[in-house]
Image (tube, rainbow, N blue to C red):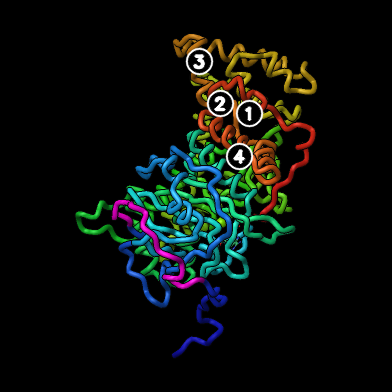
Amino acid sequence: MNAPDSLRPSLPALAPLTPHPEPGTAPRIELGLPADWSSGFAGLAADPEEPFIRPCDPSPLQECRFLAVSDHAAALLGLDAQAIMQSPEWLAVLSGNAVGRHLQPYASVYAGHQFGVFVPRLGDGRALNLGALRGWELQLKGAGQTPYARFADGRAVLRSSIREYLCSEAMHALGIPTTRALSLVAAASPVLRETVETAAVVCRVAPSFLRFGHFEYFSSRQRTDQLEQLARHSAALLGCGDSGNRTPMPASELALAVLTEVAQRSAKMTAQWMGVGFMHGVMNTDNCSVLGLTLDYGPFGFMDGFNTGHICNHSDHHGRYSFQSQPQVSLWNLSRLANALYPLVNAVDPLNAVLEHFKSNYAKEMEGLLKMKLGLQQLPEDQWGPLLDDFYSLLQSQGMDHTLAFRALSNQDEQGFSDLAPDRAACRPWLDRYQQAVSASLSLQGISAEVRQEQMRAVNPKYVLRNWIAEEVISAVRDHGDTGPLQSVARLLKNPFEEHPESERYAAPPPDWAQYLSVSCSS
Ligand code: AMP
Ligand code: MG
């Protein structure tokens, strides 16, 4: 007997794909690179009906010029930043005006939960993958429409590209897992947002750009075969599951191994975000990296004056992605990944066990990090909890600058700490208790006060990419064609834990003009 139509599981309806430049449309040029490029999805046997990727060429931009090339990111690829900056061929390739002779760029398909709502097909709408070099994938963001561009233009504006370039490299320097940025190219071509702006292209670099949404897509299409391929591909990238040289692990075990590793990495990354006061701004599942990297920099922010409910994204009207929500959202996103993997596991309890473990794992990561940040590794448990709670209550009630508060404690600068509070006297009781805790912890640890200070400064940055700093850099480039501030801020944020007397002003809270800066999803 056939099931009535109403009982048949129905697949989500998909919109038609966007017209896009066909492969071979862009000029091919010689880059003089080693020929060991490979496709990030190489080895996955795609179904022509439901492929993981679709080839697509970039669309040209006018009057392109390099604004920056990261020497650290270039070194990962065995390349030299200066040589790239001076090469017309590299400029053409990294702006999407040409394609390296042996490459065929492609866009990948994924789905995702955006602000809690499932969208059955998103995909790389404005990201084009060039291939992988030395195990690093290169991806152009803003090089034009792809099959997954839907109604949008495939472009990225200058301001958001500057923010992504700077923050990718800054997060890496803070020791936080992230996609990297090789280059930032500006163009004269207009892009329409709320006003007319100009286009830019960032070349991102990562071992893989796999997202939770890749799993969600194939799971929702009921393609268990493709889901298993993705799980095997991810397991190899994550270094979990079988190593491929004995009998392959059953799919259920493999899926659990993948989820476990992703959850562990997500717990650590989220704790690190919280530790530096970073807010991602759009923690949709399509922006969640399977490798546990900070991915897709949009309306992100670093906390200035502490407010645990702070919402950095002006478009996030209900505060779904506020600062304090991030650990909970991270777990919710993992539960979406678990749900997507269910067809491989066919049992709920083991998936739930991994999610349950995330909670204790996150708490452990956070506690370890905060003990280092406050220099109290050896404090007895019964003293730690109340001292920490009261610390955050003080930051919150006084709206103290998050970065500078931790930094002042690292320098044992009680005066500097109190100066961050409008009511300086309100800090005294907590500082007295903290001093006692420091003495108790120091004697148990057996280290000198100087060594402790050094250890604290190595985990409490002096410089983070505050919105006002990004805004100043953007304005210099956009309004005056001046890349000086971009270069000095990029240099500064490479060593955020060190003192830079010549750049002291970048350690400051927002100046008056920047009190009410807002960033939105528009990019
Ligand atoms: P985001 O909110 O930036 O993570 O983007 C969500 C989805 O929209 C992703 O699939 C993006 O690739 C796509 N998207 C965002 N902006 C554009 C654009 N200007 N052109 C094409 N696709 C876009
Ligand atoms: Mg995105």
Q: Which residues are magenta?
A: 21-37
Q: Quadrant of ligand 2?
A: bottom right
Does the closest atom of ligand 2 sit within 8 Å of the Cβ of label 2?
no
Q: Amino acid at mark 4?
A: Thr
The residue located at (49%, 51%) in the rendering is 203
Q: CA distance from mark 4 to mark 2?
A: 28 Å
Which quadrant of the figure contains the N terminus? bottom left
Q: Position of residue 393 (x, y in %)?
A: 70, 29
- Looking at the image, is mark 1 or mark 2 earlier in the sequence? 1
Mark 4 is surrounded, within 10 Å at the Cα level, by few (under 14), some (14 to 19) or many (20 or more) other residues, namely: some
Q: Which residue is mark 2?
A: 460
Q: CA distance from mark 4 to mark 3?
A: 38 Å
- Looking at the image, is mark 1 or mark 3 earlier in the sequence? 1
Residue toward you, 125 or 201: 201
Is residue 489 highlighted in magenta? no
Q: Nearer the viewer, mark 1 or mark 4?
A: 4
